[in-house]
Amino acid sequence: MTGRRATATTDLQAANCIDYGKQCSRKGYFISRKAAVLIAVVYICSLVLTGLLVFYCVPRSSSSKLQASDTNLARTFRMRPQVTLPYQKTHSSNRLTTHTIPTHYRIQLVPFIMEDNFTTSGEVWITLKCLEAADNITLNINDIEVQESSVKVTQLHPKKDLSIQVVDHVYNTDAQTYSSILDQQLMPGGQYELYIKFMGHINDHLQGFYRSSYFDPETGQKRWLASTQFSPTDARRAFPCFDEPAFKARFTVSLARSANLSSLSNMPLNFTEPMSEIPGWEWDHYNETVPMSTYLVAFIISDLHSLDATMTNLSISEDSFRFTVWAREFALPQTSYAARIGPRILHYLETYFNIPFPLPKQDMVALPDFGFSAMENWGLITFRESALLYDANISTEVNKERVAEVVSHELAHQWFGNLVTPWWWNDLWLKEGFATFIGYQGLHHVEPSWRNKDQFIRDHLQEVLMLDALESSHPISVPVQHTDQIREIFDRVSYCKGASVIRMMNHFLGEETFKRGLTNYLEVHKFSNARQDDLWQQLTLQAHQDGSLPLHMTVKEIMDTWTLQTGYPVVTVTRNYLNVSAYISQERFLLSSNTITNATWWVPLTFTTQEAPDFNMTQPQLWLENVQSTVVEGLPGNTSWVLFNVHETGFYRVNYDHANWRLLISSFQQLPDVTRAQLLDDSLNLALSGRLEYRIAMDLTSQLITDVEYLPWSAALTALEHLDTMLALTPAYGNFKVCEAGIRRGILTSFSVAYFSFTSN
């Protein structure tokens, strides 16, 4: 590479001057004979090495015709060394340019699902629109061998198409890109077609186009299948593509398969025909998709069996709509619960968003091997078996709840993530946070007795409050460029904190304003991409129209403090019992309390009092408007408690003065179980951080002796586990264990009384 070679030569010359005490004049370099010999040897070796690299690493071209002999593709591909193109900036970003954008892909894949040859042979025709003049077309590939002699670029004209010559092929293995270098410029506004024939692997990494297997319980035979997992950046492992979420296009997929297997893709099957090249094989041709991102494309080739879901009394999209669940033949009966709730949740979400589901079918598939719980591929959702299968005879209620939660989460993605997709992965939370929050709404619709809206507080909000109190946390919206960085942000901050601040926003805007704002956002950006500011804009317009937000405030101004900075505040309420007021202040909550920051948030403040308790009023009575403190007046006297953050709708903790904590402890058993869980979680974590004396936290915890509700106990046990770890090597550990044992004995006694009372009746 010339850039590196020039630098190395200059460095060597400078070293010679230093080593031999020679002065380098302007007209040349004067070096010793030994140095000259050394340079000559290095130069000759570099020439030999370059020749070897060219001979062994440059891919050889092959026939452009599809042959059965393609099945002999070598398992390991050789890629060219990384090359920095003259038109690329050498920076850390792996992003594609926007010189050309795809509008349509026609993909033909021949997957060979054979134990001695898990390979694919494929062809892709990509229709492109040129936005800026460029002499190259660069797109993503990974673990794919381009058959260079097949690559063609055509300028599309109404009268006659024009061929453009490809003069070079350049690979960047770090950026996972392939570039066709052209002999002329592509013209802005022009329509072009790029054709590539390629070879690939059906890998065993559970990413890209991968293989899976299971054993037939009757015959003991091992059965193979092939499926896809393209999110976030692995469509490029299956076919050359513009593998970024903003490059939406339509896809027409054709899959070849053995006649004893079947295939699935995002859209319904259009028609099947015999495959002339391989006897006993068939082509499945699928209908064209709506505009979508590459990570949502999916296909499966298998011998799985199906169960059609019941659609009675559900007005989903149109009469011909089909909802189907797939699994191994002997596991198919275990899909009945998912088949029952899936259409009901989908119908609920259509009503919630006031936008019809845009596809003519929805498949949900249980796969023997899957790297995640599930993946929201549009119209073809894939699941780990444990996230979709439920057998009432052997599964627990926890299993059932898990299936319902995952199904609802993935169906919510069909709008948030699929219909409207984030521009880039820094806004991953925009789809995952919403799918988590809205998924709980769908779950509540089909299983209201589970109280999952309250369960959300334990499963998501309180869990991530603990994680986000660490200095190692990160903002919800975080800049990412490399594929490794993208994978790292699929974490509880993106999912759980994202969902929790959305829940907070739902409460401070009000349910109806929130829903109307979401509908407007989805309508404006459907089949396209959006950034978080686009959502803030629509919610602000609706909030101002409805009067649910003062005109001097915007959702962007509020929510940027929650999405663009790390952590969250602890709100400290210090009451003045003489003038019945309270001084309210905020600071970032960190478990390592020695760290001081100046961060502030727009904090929606809700509160209720012992004199007039109201645990349903969750719209803010006042705000901490991104300032350190404020004062609240008109509070009750010193015999009544005050409680802030009603129903824990805000993403923050609350600390009180000593007297108010004592008032709350004395009334603990009269408070709702959600509030009891909130007080336990806050007090124990405040004690962990050194902001509250342990006596207050343990006195609250001792109230659990007669408490038989799940939420308070779950909150306390999680925090007590951390206390156990921290105190294990201290003198206080013995006293702590005695106290903890007393609390546990109390609950065992309470449960025993409740159990015997229940069984006797």
Image (cartoon, rainbow, N blue to C red):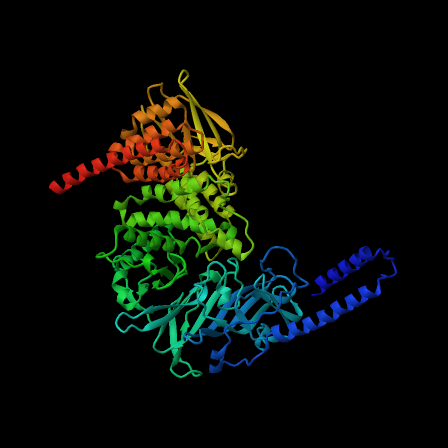
Residue found 46% across the figure and 74% down from its top:
119
Direction top: furthest residue = 578
Residue 310 showing in the rendered view: no
Q: Residue at x 40, y 76 (%)?
A: 257
Total count of labels: 0
Q: Residue at x 41, y 71 (%)?
A: 286
Which quadrant is home to the N terminus?
bottom right
- Toward the left, the furthest residue is 760
Left or right: residue 745 versus residue 169 is left
Q: Is 454 or 608 nearer to us in this picture?
A: 454
Picture layout, residue 671 above or below residue 242: above
Quarter of the picture containing the C terminus is top left
Residue nearest the viewer, comparing 751 with 634 = 751
- Quick check: 107 left or right of 678? right
The spot of residue 398 in percent (x, y) is 28, 50
Q: Quadrant of residue 113?
A: bottom left
